[in-house]
Image (spheres, rainbow, N blue to C red):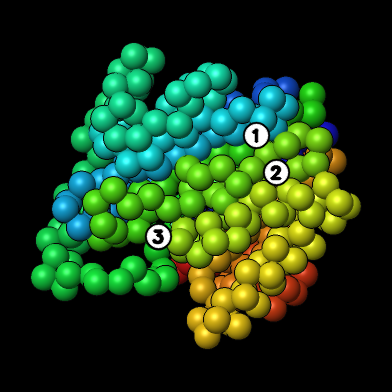
Amino acid sequence: MHALIGTWKMCLSGAKEGFGLLAAGSSAADAVERTIVRVEDEPGYTSVGYGGLPDSDGHVMLDAAFMDGGSLRMGGVMSVENVRNPIRLARALCGRETNCLLAGRGAEQAAVSFGLPLRDMRTEYAMDKWKAAVPEKHERLSAYRGHDTVCVLALDDAGGMVAGTSTSGLFMKAPGRVGDSPVIGSGFYCDARYGAAAATGLGEDIMRGCLSYEIVSLMRRGAAPKEACEEALRGLVARKLQLGEDEGSISLIALSPDGRFGAATTLSVFPFAAGAADEIALYAADGRCSPLRRVTEQEMEGEP
Ligand code: ASP
């Protein structure tokens, strides 16, 4: 059995390629990398990789992670600039016994040592957006639309499972701000015995609930992927409401070792690509926990 799930409509074409690799017998690691690289390389996606929107100082600072569910090893980078494909760097760091999570300059140096290409990740469009936003001085990061992380979970025919994430984080974030995406247990988690999970949305909230680890723990105790996503989300949202906060902007995905996938969201619609066995397609979850429905790209027009 092979399966793959990835967040947002933007990952659909990459997910089709990643799924094709799985169908041809490739590893979950290759499928995750291929899917995410496709999103990172596309300048039109302004929340991931090349073309990502800058921090308040005008720097495009990227976070990414890669976790192998067989060994429980992870690699990650935080606040890295000029690395063309942060997911490839995260994968290269995964497997190291030490120094597997690197930030800033050290991460960029590691990319050079692995022979990974560097590039100026700023596009004219992103810098124009930044120049226009500077006078507004964003005091508080809010859950605006469009800061979406690509998260991909894959299962290969040999039972291998991998989770990967890549993001430029929030537009106009404070220099040095890191969200959940490279933080193990929050932005992603993968244990091939029980399943994999990942999160997108406001990182500051996702980290409060260690949501990805929570989902995999629920699957360990027998929950199906969709049920686990819903229960983990319900727990954090209930606490936020109790504290007088709003429910926030959080979307979650999960995959089980037998190829079932699930998702949950606080949004009215959360598109994601998913497939098992022989077909991958676009689906949507909604904030009312309705059954996941298959959708077309046209229906999701205007959604990320
Ligand atoms: N989770 C990411 C962050 O907080 C952004 C997102 O996925 O929307 O950096």
Residue depicted at x 65% and y 77%: 238
Vertical placement of 100 versus 49: above or below? above
Camera sees residue 44 = no
Callout 1 crowding tier (Cα within 10 Å): few <14, some 14–19, many ≥20:
many
Amino acid type shown at disc 1: Val
Q: Secondary structure at mark 2?
A: strand
Task: Check contact, mark 1 vs mark 2: CB within 8 A.
Answer: yes
Residue type at the position of mark 3: His
Seen from the viewer's position, the closer of residues 12 and 103 is 103
- Picture disc at residue 196: 2
- Residue position for label 1: 162
Which class describes the residues within 10 Å of circle 2: few (<14), some (14-19), or many (20+)? Answer: many
State the image coordinates of residue 282 (x, y, percent, origin top left).
Answer: 63, 56
| Above or below for 91 versus 226 | above
Q: Nearer the viewer, residue 222 or 159?
A: 222
Q: Which residue is mark 3?
A: 147
Q: What amino acid is labelled 2 in the image?
A: Ala
User: Mark 2 or mark 3, which is nearer to you?
Assistant: 2
Q: Which mark is residue 174?
A: none
